[in-house]
Amino acid sequence: MGLAEHEKRELDAIAHHLKEDDPQFVTKLSKPSWHVRLSGNALFVLGLLSTYLVGLTMVVTGVTMSLWPLLVAGAVVTAIYPAKTIIGQLRKKRPS
C-alpha cells in the first residue's frame, strides 16, 4: 500500500524543513554506517573469545600434527586474556 500524494508532499516538506534546520543531522543520517559501535566490555569479551578460539585451534592443530612448538604457542595464546584479567583484578583489589 503506497502513500497518497498529499502524504508524500507532507513528508517532502518535513524533510526539507529538517534539512534547513539541521543539515549536519541530515548528513549524518544519510551516510551509511558500516561499523557497529560496541561498548568496552563487549569488545573485551569479543577479544577474549576470539583469542581463546585461535589458541584452541593452535593447540588442536599442534596435537594433530605432533608439532610441540605450535601446541605450546596455542596454550600461551589461550591463557593470555584470562591471566591478564586475573592480574588486573588482583591489582585493583590490592590496597596501595
Image: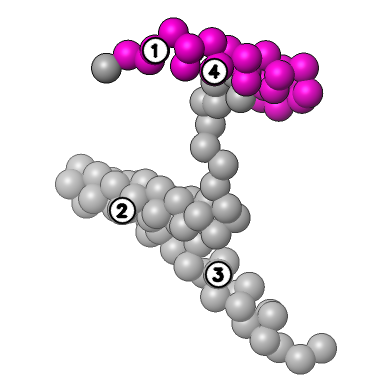
Marks 2 and 3, Cα distance to the nearest angstrom?
A: 18 Å
Looking at the rendering, the stretch of residues picked out in magenta corresponds to: 2-28
5 over 17 or under it: above or below: above
Q: Earlier in the sequence, mark 4 or mark 2?
A: 4
- For the point 71% across and 88% down, the residue is 94
What number is the disc on residue 4? 1
Q: Earlier in the sequence, mark 3 or mark 1?
A: 1
Secondary structure beneath dot 3 equals helix
Marks 4 and 2, Cα distance to the nearest angstrom?
A: 55 Å
Residue identifier under label 4: 11
Nearer mark to the viewer, of 4 and 2: 4
Q: Earlier in the sequence, mark 2 or mark 3?
A: 2
Residue identifier under label 3: 85
Is residue 69 on the magenta stretch? no
Nearer mark to the viewer, of 3 and 4: 4
The amino acid type of the residue labelled 3 equals Thr
- Residue 70 pos. (x, y %): 35, 47
- Residue 23 pos. (x, y %): 76, 19
- For the residue pair 29 and 37, the one nearer the viewer reads as 29
- For the residue pair 63 and 90, the one nearer the viewer reads as 90
Nearer mark to the viewer, of 2 and 1: 1
- Residue 32 pos. (x, y %): 55, 20
- The reply to whether dot 4 and dot 1 touch (C-beta < 8 Å) is no
- The reply to whether dot 3 and dot 1 touch (C-beta < 8 Å) is no
Residue identifier under label 2: 56
Q: Quadrant of the C terminus?
A: bottom right
- The reply to whether dot 2 and dot 3 touch (C-beta < 8 Å) is no
